[in-house]
């Protein structure tokens, strides 16, 4: 093997890298869009009841404000998601995806 060439790196086995974002770091429109995308995502559980889009959005905004949910930007996929901190995911509301 030529010494000037480095061996190819094996595929990454590291967990996905992400950066937590404060909601204030997003423009109001981007934050609203992220929350709306989250609440309309198939499989998001709001329990029993008839919730309007505005109800769902308001609930997620409250969860973000209270630290029951957070925004994480995935550096590999270059996308943001709303997740519940692991310690809250088990004991808290089922409304936010576990992350």
Image (spheres, rainbow, N blue to C red):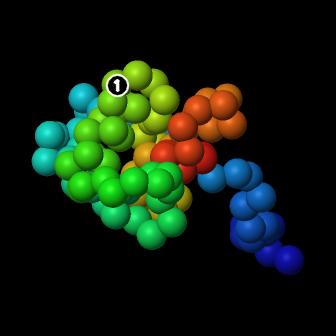
| Quadrant assignment, res 71 | top left
Residue 47 in the image: above or below residue 8: above
On the picture, is 45 further left or further right than 21? right
Name the residue rendered at 26%, 46% in the picture.
55
Whether residue 74 is visible, yes or no, is no
Q: Give the left or right position of residue 6, taking residue 32 as reference.
A: right
Q: Nearer the viewer, residue 56 or 24?
A: 56
Seen as rendered, the residue at the extreme bottom is 1
Q: Which residue is mark 1?
A: 65
Left or right, residue 50 beside residue 77 = left
In the displayed orientation, state which residue is furthest to the front: 49
View extreme (top): residue: 66
Residue shown at the point (77%, 58%) measured from the top left? 13
What SS does tag 1 mark? helix
Residue located 48% across and 29% down the image: 68
Query: Where is residue 29 shown, x and y percent of the image?
Result: 13, 47
| Depth check, front residue: 18 or 6 | 18
Q: Residue at x 44, y 46 (%)?
A: 82
Asked if one can make out residue 33 in the rendered structure from this viewpoint, the answer is: yes
Q: Residue furthest right?
A: 1
Q: Percent position (x, y) of residue 57?
A: 27, 46
Relative to 42, say whether 24 is above or below: above
Q: Quadrant of the N terminus?
A: bottom right
Above or below residue 27? Residue 46 is below
Q: In x, y percent, where is residue 42?
A: 45, 69
Number of marks present in the image shown: 1
Give 67 or 14, whichever is nearer the viewer: 67
x%, y% of residue 32? Answer: 21, 47
Q: Dot 1 surroundings within 10 Å: few (below 14), some, or many (20 or more)?
A: few
């Amino acid at each position: 093997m030529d010494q000037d060439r480095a061996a190819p790196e094996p595929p990454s086995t590291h967990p996905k890298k992400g950066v937590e974002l404060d909601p204030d770091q997003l423009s109001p429109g981007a934050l609203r869009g992220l929350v709306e995308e989250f609440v309309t995502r198939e499989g998001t559980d709001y329990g029993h009841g008839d919730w309007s889009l505005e109800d769902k959005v308001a609930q997620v905004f409250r969860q973000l404000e209270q630290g029951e949910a957070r925004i994480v930007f995935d550096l590999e996929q270059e996308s943001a998601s709303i997740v519940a901190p692991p310690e809250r995911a088990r004991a808290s509301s089922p409304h936010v995806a576990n992350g």
